[in-house]
Image (cartoon, rainbow, N blue to C red):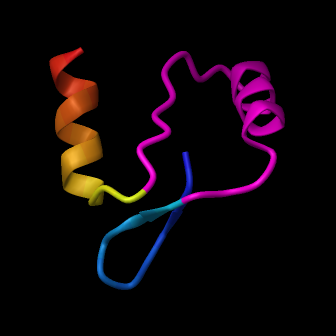
Amino acid sequence: MGEVGLLGEVRKVLGLERRVKEAKKLGYSVASAESGKSVAAAIKKLLRD
């Protein structure tokens, strides 16, 4: 979970626990907190797990 920068990097966000709780309420079952990695790398990791 994070902001995506113009170069495709995932940036750290504040209030991660609160965001995860809200995502669960909305029906999401998987979250990734891969700050500093590219979006592609985070997606590949999610697909492997």
Q: Position of residue 18 (x, y in %)?
A: 84, 34
In the drawing, does residue 12 fall left or right of residue 5?
Answer: right
Res. 26 image quadrant = top right
Res. 46 image quadrant = top left
Residue for point 20% across, 25% down: 47
**Residue that sits furthest to the front in the current view:** 36
Residue range of the region highlighted in magenta in the rendering: 12-35
Residue 29 covered by magenta stretch:
yes
Q: Position of residue 11 (x, y in %)?
A: 51, 64
Q: Nearer the viewer, residue 12 or 21?
A: 12
**Residue that sits furthest to the bottom in the current view:** 6
Q: Nearer the viewer, residue 33 or 29?
A: 33
Seen in the picture, residue 29 relative to 19 is either above or below; the reply is above
Residue for point 79% across, 21% down: 25
Res. 14 image quadrant = bottom right
Seen in the picture, residue 3 relative to 49 is either above or below; the reply is below
Residue for point 81% across, 46% down: 15
Number of disc labels: 0
Q: Quadrant of the C terminus?
A: top left
In the drawing, does residue 44 fall left or right of residue 36?
Answer: left
Residue 19 covered by magenta stretch:
yes
Seen in the picture, residue 10 relative to 47 is either above or below; the reply is below
Q: Position of residue 43 (x, y in %)?
A: 25, 41
Q: Quadrant of the N terminus?
A: top right
Residue for point 22% across, 31% down: 45
